[in-house]
Amino acid sequence: MSNKKLLPPKTGDLADWYTTIIQLADLSDYGPAKGTMIIKPYGYAIWELIQEAMNPLIKAKGVQNAYFPLFIPMSLLEKEANHVEGFAPELAIVTHGGGEKLEEPLVVRPTSETIMYNSFSKWLQSWRDLPIMMNQWNNVVRWEKRTMPFLRTSEFLWQEGHTAHVAHDEAADMQKWAMDMYAHIYRNFFALDGYVGYKSASERFAGADTTLTYESLMPSGKALQACTSHDLGQNFAKPFNITFQDKEGVDAFAWQTSWGLSTRSIGGLILAHGDDNGLRLPPKLAPTQIVIVPVRPEPELITYCKELVNQLQQAGTRAAIDDRDDESFGFRLNKAEVKGIPIILKIGSKELEQKLVTAKRRFDGYEEQISLDVIANKLSQSLDEIQAMMLKASQEYTTKNTREASDYDEFKRIQSEHKGFIKVYWNDNAAVEKQIKDETTATSRCMIEDGVSGTDFVTGEPATQQWIFAQSY
C-alpha cells in the first residue's frame, strides 16, 4: 500500500493528518518518555537550514553564540517573582543525583534568563563592558500535559538570544531588531505570513515589560505564536544585581532583552503548507530541493541520472537521486510527494533519448519538459518561483481569513461562522480578556496598530489600539 493511501485527507481530522504525515515523511518519532520527540535526520535537516539562515544574521548584529548549563539552581529561578510564577506549572525538577538527595533542587532549563543573568552580574563592571549580547542553540524542558510533535513537546530545541544594554532605547531597538529578523526568516524562508505586534499584559512573557510576537494562521483557523522577542526592562537586572558604572562613575542597572524561535516553527511549516498528498516544503527549507526518479534501474538510465544530479549539485541546488531497486517507480514518486520535495524529475527512456527531463512542481503540480542544456538555470528559476508562490498563497490565506468586528456580538458571530483572525479596537484589559477567553476560548494574539481612533468592541469606550484575536495552539 502506498504512503498516499495511508495519509488521511487534510480537510478531515487535521490532527490525524498532521501526526500521520510527520511519520510518513520521516520527520520524527515519539520518544520513550511521555511528551518527548525524536527528531529524525530529515526533520533535523530542516532545523539545520533554519540555523543556517539565522546564524549569519545573529552574528552580523554582533551577537555571539555561547552555551550555559542545563541545570538551574531553584534559588536562581526564584529571584524574579513573575518569572518563577509563570513557569511553575511546567517545571521539571531534579531532587536527587548520584544516589543522594541534593541540598538544593535543580530545575531542568525551561528558559535561560536566570542562569545567564547570574553570570552577567559577575562579568559586568563598567559601561565599557556593554552591550553583552549572547545567543545559544539548545534544548529546553517544559512539562506539557497535552503534547503534539513539534508544536508542543516536553522537550524542544530553540535558539534564545539574551542581551544587556546601557540604556533602555538600545534594549527596545534590540527587541525590535530580533522580531524584524524573525519576520524576515518566516516570510522569506518559511514562506509563512503573519502579524507582528505586542502581546497583551495577560499574554506577554513572565518577567517582561513588553513582548513582540509573530502570529501565523494555521489551516485549523487557530493562531500559532511562532516566536517572541521581549523587552525585559530592569526586571531581571535588579534581582540579579546586573549593574555597571556609567560614564559618570555612578552605579546603574542594565536594560535587557531576550528572544527566541523554536522547533515549533517546523510544526507551523508542516501545517500551513501541507496538503492531502503530504508535505509541501518551501525550497529554501527543503533538505532536498530536487529529486531525480528514474523509471527503471537500468545502467544507462542510472548513469544519465547521476550525471544530472552532479550537474545540479554543482549549480548550487540540493539535488538527490532515488534509484532504489526494491521500490516501484510509482512508490518512489509518491514518496517524493509525501516528503514535500519541491521539484521531482522523472527520467525514462524518452528523456534519455531526447536529452531532457520531465519536471513536476510539488506545490501546484505543474509539469513540463526541460532540455538538458538549460536544466540548471531553469530549475533554479523554478525554485525561486515556487518560494514566491508559497509566500503569496500564505499572504492571501491570512488576508482572506482576517475579519473585523465592531462589537462583541459581531465578534462572537464571526467566530462561530468562520476560521481565523478577528480584528478589533480594544483597550488591553486583563479582566475583559479573561471574560472573552472563558466565553469564546479566543485570546488576544497581538496589538497591530497604536495611536488610532476607535471604539472598544467589548466596553464601548474610546480605544486607541487595534488588536487581533483568535483561538490558538
Image: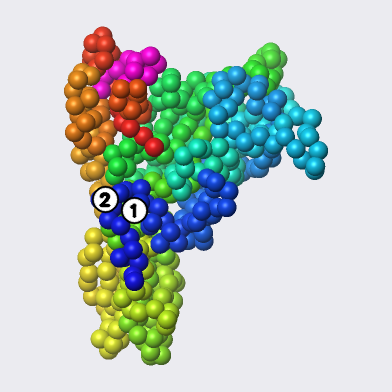
Above or below, comparing residue 198 to residue 62 in the picture: above
Q: Position of residue 189 (x, y in %)?
A: 39, 50
Of residues 124 and 345, the one drawn nearer to the viewer in this rendering: 345
Where does the image place residue 21, in percent across and percent down from the top left?
A: 38, 57
Q: Can residue 173 be seen from the camera position used here?
A: no
Q: Is residue 413 visible?
A: yes
* Pick the front one: 152 or 303: 152
Mark 2 — residue?
A: 12
- Three-letter code, disc 2: Gly
Residue at horizontal 35%, vertical 24%?
A: 437
Marks 1 and 2 in Cβ contact (< 8 Å) = yes
Q: Residue 298 lies in what quarter of the image?
A: bottom left
In the picture provided, is 248 more to the left or to the right than 462?
A: right
Q: Secondary structure at mark 2?
A: loop
In the image, residue 434 lies in the stretch drawn in magenta:
yes
Question: At numbered mark 1, what does the secondary structure look like: helix, strand or loop?
Answer: helix
Residue 17, label in figure: 1
Badge 1 crowding class, 10 Å Cα cut-off, few under 14, some 14 to 19, many 20 or more, is: many
* Front in this rendered view, residue 157 or 177: 157
Identify which residue is drawn at 80% across, 43% down: 98
| Location of residue 64 (image quadrant) | top right
Q: Which residues are magenta?
A: 424-436
Q: Residues within 10 Å of mark 2 (few under 14, many from 20)?
A: few
